[in-house]
Image (cartoon, rainbow, N blue to C red):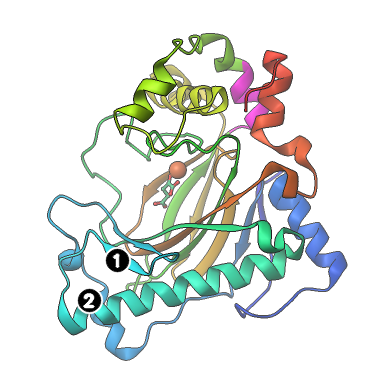
Amino acid sequence: MSPIITLDAARWEAPLAPAAAAAATRDLEAGNVLFLPQLKFALAAEEQRFLSPQWLARGAKNVSYDPRSSTLAHTSADGADREQLSAMIARYASHAQQLILNLCPHYGQHLKYGLTSFRPVETRGRETSRKKDDTRLHVDAFASRPNQGLRILRVFSNINPRNEPRVWEIGEPFDAMAGKFAARVPPQVPGSAWLLEKLGITKGRRSAYDHVMLNLHDKAKLDDGYQQATPRTHFEFPAQTTWLVFTDRVMHAALAGQFLLEQTFYLPVAAMQDERYAPLRILEQIYRRRLA
Ligand SMILES: O=C(O)CCC(=O)C(=O)O
Ligand SMILES: [Fe+2]
């Protein structure tokens, strides 16, 4: 069965009927990508100029925005340019939040904003280490931001002006991947989580869950044999479309594409419609102990 489920929503602010929302939430939690081919993020005429890598700060890969503090980072824009770029990304953040609240009304106030990113660089051929290489299949886990089991839900919109798709691959189900790599995760060194926090390397304490998720992320990306042989679904998200996915559960890789907006959200496991789908719960089954 394809892990891509298409919904025909064409507006950011249109609520779904309760049964349709419950079904969308279940599909999302169960590890599918919800694809909204009719939902585009429209740029105003004067915003078209932002479709260029020139607005990136030197050495940065994405422009980032924090909707909680309304701060823009990693950009070279200043003055009026900076204000307009910031307003464009802020509008995306609020549309993305509205979209999730329509599709998953159940999440309500439990849904918390993470960062927003604007990705103006072509993904194909970008140089990075294998661990940072998002063209390799992985689940998301953030090395410097431990999240103690919180879910990572991301909304993506392809805003490419030349009609070029964002090319993804979706890998095998989380349980299958975790079944292969869990036994290769080394024990967390006692005191290391405390030390990483103390040194400012992590924002907050790295839990056993964070330790395992980071290892799954790294071990899968570094395993060339796995990357070559694991089954996958190739999918091209056309320009002017939107999709959302729990990226801590769904194995994904971005092979090509330029100009993307992305909004990250965090959701407590207890706020899910069915928490058995959470990586935290699946990993606790595998290891037979509490991880967060
Ligand atoms: O840039 C993309 O299309 C997705 C990259 C990725 O792996 C992610 O955002 O989690
Ligand atoms: Fe990712």
Which region shows up in magenta? 172-179
* Residue 81 occupies quadrant: bottom left
- Residue 136 image point, x, y percent: 40, 34
The N terminus lies in which quarter of the figure? top right
What amino acid type should be assigned to the residue bearing mark 2? Arg
In the rendered view of the protein, which quadrant contains the C terminus? top right
Residue at image position (44%, 60%) is 262
Taking depth in this image into account, of 152 and 233 the one nearest to the observer is 152
- Residue 5, above or below 79: above
- Residue 191: x and y in percent read 43, 14
The answer to whether mark 1 and mark 2 are in CB contact below 8 A is yes
The local secondary structure at tag 1 comes to strand
Report the residue marked by disc 2. Answer: 82
Please report the residue visible at 53 percent of the width from the left and 22 percent of the height from the top.
212
Q: Earlier in the sequence, mark 1 or mark 2?
A: 1
Which quarter of the figure has residue 221?
A: top left
